[in-house]
Amino acid sequence: MAVAVDAPAKINLALHVMGRRDDGYHLLESVCVFTRMGDRLSVEVADRDRFHVHGPYASDVPQDGSNLVLRALDALRQISGRDARPVSIALEKNLPVASGLGGGSSDAAATLLALARLWRIPADAALLREVGSRLGADVPMCLEQRPLVARGVGDILEPLEHFPALPIVLANPGVAVSTPSVFRALARSDHPHLPALPPLADAAAVAEWLRRARNDLHDAALSLAPGIADVLKALDRQGALVARMSGSGATCFGIFRDMTSAREAASGLQAQQPGWFVAASLAEGTGD
Ligand code: C5P
């Protein structure tokens, strides 16, 4: 029987860069949420290993062993020693690649979660986090799929206990941005900490908090992809409570008061910019 798992888009609502380790990785503080919209992955036992990618962005991802999905399969097999039976993996690629939405990391995390179910490894096992961190700095947070604060190099995770669901519009101008290049273009890595994060009741309160927070990768990403400025302006013009860039870009998000206004803004923006990736989605809250 196939096990299907969502690989949601990861949005860095704020991302502060506060230092740099000797190995070049940066010390961060980031508030992350995950949208309903995303990639989708399914695994099932098969006669031999197979990997099939479909969906709107399928042609942008490698289908060989360099894909994070297959690297996740290899790593979990090797480390868990549980089950070497061949599996067939299907990935529906709905998120643009190299876009600041953690798509590859979320796909890798979904692979680990799906295989854990197929192979009956407890999904909260430290093992999954350990395997995830070997695959990429963002994979452990993508295993959580719920609002959290990430610290360290993204490996120290604090799930938030109370956080509202957020009506969101995602917009990407169709420019792939390489995360290592953005970090290399950073002028400074000694920014202040995130502002204190009190309980936030709704989207308006989150927007107000975000006005005091930053994405410290914004200027570096803008130097590589100047079109990001147009995306932020376009989201503002559609009535976003606040608009920011996610991760290392180029995807930007706008927060809206409700899903109706988010959907209207998304169709308005898509009509103006038919070549952009535009999507309205709910970023999951903690459900209280
Ligand atoms: O770990 P991952 O391969 O996803 O990270 C991509 C790149 O992002 C790294 O090679 C590094 O240049 C940069 N990075 C960083 N500090 C982090 C996370 C990522 O400098 N905390």
Image: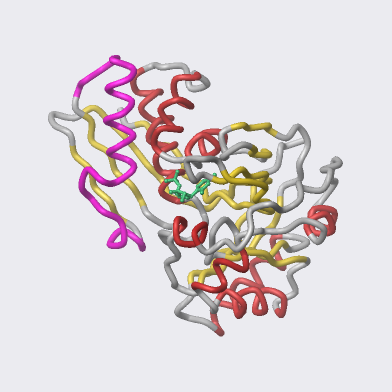
- The residue furthest left is 47
Tell me if 275 is positioned left or right of 160 in this view.
left
Q: Quadrant of residue 109?
A: top left
Residue at position x 13%, y 29% in the image: 47
- Reply above or below: 171 against 258: below
Residue 16 x/y as whole percent: 68, 51
Position of 226 relative to 185 (above/below):
below
The quadrant holding residue 246 is bottom right
Q: Is residue 164 magenta?
A: no
Inspect the magenta stretch and tell me whether residue 76 lies in it: yes
Residue at 57%, 66% (x, y): give it. 220
Question: Which residues lie in the magenta part?
Answer: 56-85
34 in relation to 177, above or below: above
User: Residue 144: image x %, image y %?
Assistant: 57, 34
Front residue of 228/73: it is: 228
Q: Position of residue 160 (x, y in %)?
A: 72, 35
- Relative horizontal placement of residue 245, taking residue 47 as reference (left or right): right
Q: Identify the residue at the far front of this view.
A: 22
Report x, y in % for residue 106.
46, 43
Residue nearest the observer in this picture, 89 or 212? 212
* Colour convention: secondary structure
Q: Nearer the viewer, residue 89 or 252?
A: 252
- Total marks in image: 0
Position of the N terminus by quadrant: top left
Q: Quadrant of the C terminus?
A: top right
- Residue at (78%, 57%) from the top-left corner? 210
Q: Is residue 90 above or below residue 230?
A: above
Q: List the single residue furthest toward the bottom.
A: 272
